[in-house]
Image: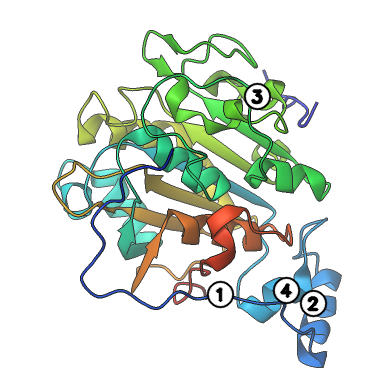
Amino acid sequence: MAFVRPRTPGTPTAAPRPAVQRPTRRRGPRPLTALASGLGLLAGSLGLWAAGGSAAADTAAGLPAPDHVVVVVLENHAYTQVIGSSSAPYINGTLVAGGAKLTRSYALTHPSQPNYYMLFSGSSQGIVDDSCVDVGALQEPNLASELLASGQTWASYNEGLPAQGATDCRVDSYAQKHNPWFGFGNVPTDSAYGMDAFPSDYSTLPKLSFVVPDLCDDMHDCSVGTGDSWLSSNLDGYAQWAKSHNSLLVVTFDEDNRLSGNRIPTLLYGAHVAPGSSTATTYNHYDLLHTLEDLTGVNAHAGNSSGAADTTGIWN
């Protein structure tokens, strides 16, 4: 089993890209300089680097090495529908004001499911629609398999999941299409939990976890305000804890409303994030995956993540 339950009870259609795009940035192996080595040793002595991570690589990349990362994926809203909206007081008043926003963050295609696979594994894996997938049919590298291979921990928390590891296609407001881990045979199904298993003792969280609300609370079927309230009620405790416990919250969206060139909100909040910061560099799901891989020090990049870039300009 990949993660011990917490102690407490062909090719998708590409979305329009921005008119001005940065060149593809490929990063080869980074040399371990004396400076990077010294900083890594110093950080290790202070207990700031998580077990199993690569302190030297993270130092060279200018990224922190958080002990815990929680990624929340919301649904089907454009950047301008959320950022600055009075319907999202928690997102704007807390996460934007006290964290960082990526002002040119883009999803890669439509509809939902291929975007989840791109974010999780660096490829759509040939998925072009929202149909149920064959559970465990894929063996390609992905974020969870990379974490497990590096001796680290992983879990997903899926609102409405009928039971731990359940592979149902659809139950009430729960939808498998938003849970790409079920498509991969190298990710144990029992690493998928319901939201009732999200721990109140945040120190028991795995190194990295995904949180997926149901079809109402993720803003797919319900309002921006509904999703905003759900985030506040379910993740603010962790968000505030993260600031003083070397941890990170990431909030992003699968796709926009098909009216804004697939520009989506993406926010980061927690330790080492400069409060109120932003970057106008263009990023997409592959870049976010690349950043998560480097934040957790897995020393691997799945699929198209290998040609993507780390998020910069928001760290303090």
**First in sequence: mark 1 vs mark 3:** 1
Spatial CA distance of label 4 from label 3 is: 32 Å
- The part of the image, by quadrant, that contains residue 226 is top left
Q: Is residue 35 left or right of residue 308?
A: right
Q: CA distance from mark 4 to mark 2?
A: 9 Å
Q: Are marks 1 and 3 in contact (CB under 8 Å)?
A: no
Considering depth in this image, is 243 or 187 the residue closer to the camera?
187
- Give coordinates of residue 100: x percent, y percent: 39, 64
Q: Amino acid at mark 3?
A: Gly
In this rendering, position of residue 199 left or right of residue 116: right
The amino acid type found where label 2 is placed reads: Gly
Q: Which mark is residue 26?
A: 1
| Residue that label 4 marks | 57
Mark 1 or mark 4, whichever is nearer to me: 1
Which residue corresponds to mark 3? 136
Q: Secondary structure at mark 2?
A: helix
**Nearer mark to the viewer, of 2 and 3:** 3
**Could you tell me which quadrant the N terminus lies in?**
top right
Q: Which mark is residue 40?
A: 2
Where residue 217 sits: x, y (%)? 33, 26
What residue is at 49 percent from the left and 66 percent from the top? 273
